[in-house]
Image (cartoon, rainbow, N blue to C red):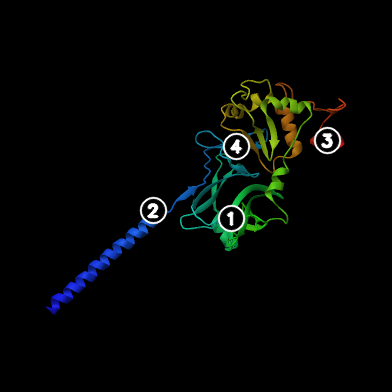
Amino acid sequence: MKWIKNKWVISSLLLLAIFSAVLIHHHLTAKKDDVKYNDYSIKVDKILLFGDKQQYVVGLDKKGRDTGAEPTQNYLVSQERRMQERLANNNHQLEGDYWYLILHDLRTKDFKKRKIDLYKQLYRYDYRLQPWGWDAVYYNGKDYVAVQVTLKEDPDTQNGRSRYLFLDLETERFQEAPQGFDTKTYREEMDMGFGPTNLQEAMDPYHAGIIFWHLSFSGFNDKEKFPKTANINLYQECPEMVKLVQEEKIFEVYLRKGQNTKESVFEDMRHWFAPIGQDKIDVVATNPKTGEQTPINSYQEMEDWWSQN
């Protein structure tokens, strides 16, 4: 009887152990299945370059739409990113998270790709940090991605807690950004105006403007469409760009940083929006109060005219 009783106890314990193992496995599996991820990837399937020096660029997805990929001078930068959903307001790497920067080399015929593990390189520099976002920049003759970071213990980027690091795209190493650098100021460096001039009047039908390192064609709607035909150099020299804007697949092209200055962009606009057969528009600024007209031969003269009128 004692042997039978012991056998029953052992059998019961074995069944209990098996049952517990099944419950634990089910719990772990269910917990794993409950984890959700958000995908923030930017996949570039086609790259187009425009201009006599290929100084304007746009990266398109498989449907021919703008991806938002950003250029430095030598690279178009996109990303592969997956982030686990979380209740806490943080951006450090959790299990299953990844964040890769994809570099498309604009100097090569096939736009050769290279991948940088953003988390890996950042934690190699300082494991206490977490990344929040990035901007492609060109600074002092080098290609960088400026990454906004905070300490992991800080919940967000508000109240001056964040700073920028520069990721050197050649060495793939982080370094401190120049003191006082911020991407807002950097973007505003290439924010240009052309009015009140005949150049602005020539650009107005296309809603064209230079805004934060972009040649923008914005503000069209169901009642007003981008012109189908036009007798200007832009339509003759950049038909693929025009077609994409007409089809509402892109609303801007990107200025390659390091290959564009305010003066060079001013000259490009004078040429692209001039009538076919004319090299460039002879720009004239008109004082709206007096009607006085002043020839403008450079963007510096444009800025000087504004300061005096």
User: For numbered disc 4, what is the local secondary structure?
Assistant: strand
Q: Which amino acid lies under the numbered mark 3 shown in the image of this protein?
A: Trp
Q: Mark 4–mark 1 contact, CB under 8 Å?
A: no
In the image, which disc is placed on residue 306? 3
- Alpha carbon separation for disc pair 3 and 4: 32 Å
Q: Please state which of residues 170 and 81 is positioned toward the viewer in this rendering.
A: 81
Image check: 301 left or right of 109? Answer: right
Place of residue 222 in the rendered image (x, y in percent of width and height, measured from the top left): 59, 25
Which is nearer the N-term, disc 3 or disc 2?
2
- Alpha carbon separation for disc pair 1 and 3: 40 Å
The residue labelled by disc 4 is 58
Answer above or below: position of 16 versus 296.
Answer: below
User: Comparing marks 3 and 4, which lies closer to the viewer?
Assistant: 3
The residue labelled by disc 2 is 33
Which is nearer the N-term, disc 1 or disc 3?
1
Q: Which amino acid lies under the numbered mark 1 shown in the image of this protein?
A: Pro
